[in-house]
Image (cartoon, rainbow, N blue to C red):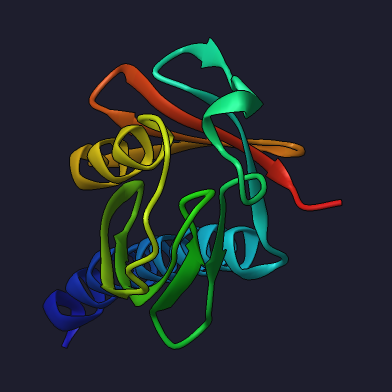
Amino acid sequence: MKRLEKLFYPVSFVILLSVLASACKTSSKTNTTNFLTAHPWELIAINGKELDMSAFQKGTPFLKFEDDGRLSGSTGCNNFSGDFKLENKSLTLNPGAMTRMACQGNGEMLVLDALSMVKNIKTDADKLTLLDGSRELMTLVPEK
């Protein structure tokens, strides 16, 4: 009986630590999802450069993340509706279906190319940075 008592406390402690670690991982994912879905995000920089609004005749590009994994937004010319997948700080974006209006300049292609390369994110108080590893692709702020 003494032998079982000696094993009980260490095993209980390991189980407790496992449960706590699991809860922290879920909380981190939930916090990041809540951060993304709190409001629409307006693009302010692309490929590390401030946004040149002359490339976007129909407004500032934006992204809107939904709790159920849906993604919608605008390229600054066409609107799109697709989905996203978030795992920890890894992010995959799929713009999905898109309107097909003619767009002048290369703004839309810059946005679509950047969206296709997103692999992870960095979050700050009021800024969302979409990255390809450590390379900044898109910087967004809460929509005004």
Q: Residue furthest top?
A: 49
* Of residues 136 and 112, the one drawn nearer to the viewer in this rendering: 112
* Of residues 102 and 6, the one drawn nearer to the viewer in this rendering: 102
Image point 20% across, 46% down: which residue?
Answer: 116
Q: Quadrant of the N terminus?
A: bottom left
Q: Is residue 133 left or right of residue 141?
A: left
Query: Above or below — where is 10 with respect to 67?
Result: above
Image point 52% across, 66% down: which residue?
Answer: 33
**Residue 52, image x and y in percent?**
60, 20
Image point 38% across, 42% down: which residue?
Answer: 108
**Residue 101, image x and y in percent?**
39, 64
Query: Above or below — where is 81 with respect to 106?
Result: below
Image point 37% across, 40% down: which residue?
Answer: 111
Q: Which of the 4 quarters of the picture holds residue 83?
A: bottom left
**Residue 60, image x and y in percent?**
65, 44
Q: Is residue 28 left or right of residue 36?
A: left
Q: Is residue 23 left or right of residue 143?
A: left
Q: How many marks?
A: 0
Query: Above or below — where is 92 with respect to 123?
Result: below
**Residue 50, image x and y in percent?**
60, 14
